[in-house]
Amino acid sequence: MLEVDIPGFGIVKLEHLVSAFSGTLSCDGTLLPGLAEQLNAVVQILQIHIVTADTFGKAQDEFKNVHCTVHILSGSGLDLQKEEYVLSLGAEKVVALGNGNNDRRMLKAARIGIAVTGGEGCAADAVMAADIH
């Protein structure tokens, strides 16, 4: 668990990091260089959950050396599925990362939502839903 007192935001007690994969932690479905090691350091403090539609079909393989849960989504309503996943963990204990339009609801639901702008950009709705961008 991670407990932080953020001025103007209050005390935050986090247990889970929930992240999208495509564009947030990867480029073209490949985990960004050095990120596996960084995530394995974070897992000492927070449980890591990857929620993805796995557009490139590589998520399971990309996270094989990361101590995390990979949750593959399917069908329609990916934004709702991601939000429901965050809510199932107890949204007040979640920090979420995302960059896509389908991440907006999960970013809004999480105690702390972070919109990530990388090489693949960031949807305006994700930025608007996030606490940090």
Image (cartoon, rainbow, N blue to C red):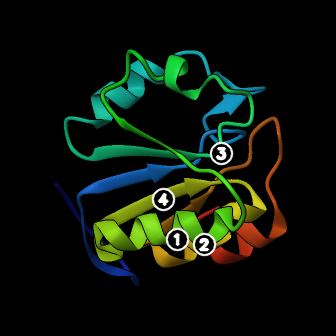
C-alpha separation, residue under disc 2 versus residue under disc 4 = 14 Å
Query: What residue did someone put label 3 on?
Result: 53
The x, y position of residue 64, in whole percent, is: 42, 17
The image quadrant of residue 10 is: bottom left
Name above or below for residue 2 compared with residue 33: below
Residue 131 can be seen in this image: no
In the rendered structure, find residue 80 and report the number of the disc placed on it: 2
C-alpha separation, residue under disc 1 versus residue under disc 2 = 5 Å
Name above or below for residue 54 compared with residue 105: above
**Which numbered disc, 3 or 4, marks the residue that appears first in the sequence?**
3
The x, y position of residue 117, in whole percent, is: 73, 48
The x, y position of residue 37, in whole percent, is: 39, 19
Residue type at the position of mark 3: Ala
- Whether residue 7 sits left or right of residue 81 in the image: it is left
User: Element under label 2?
Assistant: helix
**Which numbered disc, 3 or 2, marks the residue that appears first in the sequence?**
3
Query: What residue did someone put label 1 on?
Result: 83
Please report contact status of discs 2 and 4: CB closer than 8 Å, yes or no: no
C-alpha separation, residue under disc 3 versus residue under disc 1 = 14 Å
Please report contact status of discs 1 and 4: CB closer than 8 Å, yes or no: no
Crowding near pointer 1: few (<14 within 10 Å), some, many (20+)?
many
Which residue is pictured at 56% across the width and 65% down the height?
81
C-alpha separation, residue under disc 3 versus residue under disc 2 = 12 Å
Q: Of discs 3 and 4, which sits in the foreground? A: 3
User: Element under label 1?
Assistant: helix
The x, y position of residue 131, in whole percent, is: 56, 73
The image quadrant of residue 112 is: bottom left
Image quarter of the C terminus? bottom right
Query: What residue did someone put label 4 on?
Result: 96
Which residue is pictured at 43% across the width and 64% down the height?
85
- Whether residue 56 sits left or right of residue 111 in the image: it is right
C-alpha separation, residue under disc 3 versus residue under disc 4 = 16 Å
